[in-house]
Image (cartoon, rainbow, N blue to C red):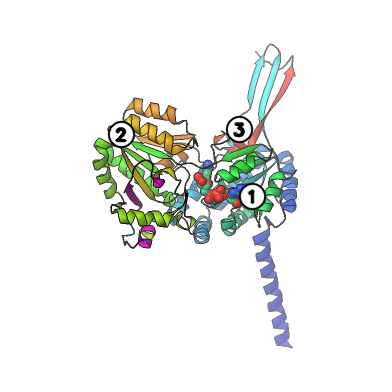
Amino acid sequence: MAMAKEQLIENVVGRVLSLLGEEGASSCGYEKVDEAVAAAGAAQKAWQWDFSLEARMRVVDRLRRDLLEGDVIREVSALALEETGMGRLDDKLIKKRLAVEKTPGPEFFATKAVSGDHGLVLEELSPFGVIASITPSTNPVASVFNNTLCMISGGNGVVFAPHPGAVKSTLRALEHVTRSLEASGAPSGLVTTLTQPSMENLGLLMEHRGIQLISATGGPGVVRAALSSGKPAVGAGPGNPPVVVDETADLRAAARDVILGCSFDNNLPCIAEKELFAVNCIADELKKHMLESGAFELKDPKDVGKLMELTLRGDAPNKACVGKSAPWLLEQIGLKVGGDVRVILVETPEDHPFVQVEMLMPVLPLVRVADFDEALAASLRAEHGFRHSAAIHSTHVVHMSRMARAMETTIFTKNAPSYASIGVGGDCPTAFTIATTTGQGPTTPLSFCRTRRCLLHGAFRIV
Ligand code: NAD
């Protein structure tokens, strides 16, 4: 009898624990699109109308604190690495911390007021409502932290649609978000996610009447789909960032910065240096410094051929190699190198696929050019008009200025690793959704809001 009672208690405790676990795991996750949107819709209304600015600020501050506390960042970073098999743990920790600490919050908003002979006009940024946020496999957790902070700071609710290859880590990141939001009294369901992000569900989500804005971060397919939905969209598409080093650059610093930027998270960031154009007269010295800074040069044409066979599938990268480390890639073609090798450097002509394809792995083609003009022309061709990102290392003011203007990229970095432009050692807020196609640029809470005007005729000017 005693045994039966003990067994019963054990069973009940086990069931309660498992229910708690399940609830924790699914409190923000929904199989059905309708349910995810309905939950976010109800919560968003309460968030917009029942929460003062001060209350929203408190919720967002607490969310930042909770995500930075204990082991959260390490846990979700390790999970993203394990699930996707892409990137480097040390860099993933930096990315998540950056997303939590340097994403702007509700304090970013300022009301615009114009007073004149006819009275007063106010312009304020108002939430769209519920945003469908479609996130990439290359950045699953940092995008979720960054988008959540931006979107709810502007008074919106969110339904995330994770990449099918990153559902587990996205869900886990959102569980931490949800736990914090609930603990600080934010409306339940403000941030939800689909647990079955099939193409069919993505279509249903984008077309859903309860979705007022689509945020699409990824390759050309998802941006095209968002723009064809007929809804307002924030389209953050692909890039292929060139970096130029001219004859006036500090070559040691340029070599170090190019290696650091190119190898950050094994080249997964869309802003990371993907091809290098070096002016011929400094190319050898630059290469020497790069080899001292973590590059390994692949010279034998047979090895280069093997690397191409391994890493390319037609005019796209082999997905199995995206975000893999330089030593891992080299090992696959039979070369063993130390763990301190961060980048595989290959001298190529301009029309080589390593130059023209967005590889998303630490394979850096170096193209020799006669002068800055040739470097600029080749950079424009390699960027393919994405208007995403580009960089230069130079002390020549005219070169820097000409390239910044000609590239017309959303982000242009001078004399620093590309990641400085999202706040790692750069004085700017961070963004993991860089709206290239639709033009909002590196997104902030303002990017997810709409402008509304309110006019009072005949009064309220005080001077
Ligand atoms: P991806 O395009 O394969 O997937 C991104 C998201 O879009 C996923 O959630 C996926 O399920 C969804 N998706 C893909 N095709 C779709 C379609 N036809 N209709 C609807 N949804 C679709 O991208 P990825 O491989 O996960 O990420 C890498 C790409 O994302 C690179 O091109 C990179 O440059 C780009 N990226 C851009 C930014 C930016 O801010 N501009 C940030 C990160 C990544």
Q: On the image, numbered disc 1 is attached to which residue?
A: 160
Name the amino acid, label 2: Asp
Name the amino acid, label 3: Phe
**Dot 2: what SS?**
loop
Residue 333 part of the magenta segment: yes
For marks 1 and 3, the one nearer the N-term is: 3
Q: Quadrant of the C terminus?
A: top right
Task: From this view, report whether residue 282 is shown above or below residue 37.
Answer: above
Q: With 44 as the anchor, is 327 left or right in this view?
A: left
Location of residue 54 in the rendering, given as x and y in whole percent from the top left corner? 65, 39
Name the amino acid, label 1: Phe
Location of residue 423 in the rendering, given as x and y in whole percent from the top left corner? 46, 40
Observer-side mark, 1 or 3, equals 1
Q: On the image, numbered disc 2 is attached to which residue?
A: 246
Q: With 259 as the anchor, is 214 left or right in this view?
A: right
Q: Which residues lie in the magenta part?
A: 329-354
Q: Which mark is residue 109?
A: 3
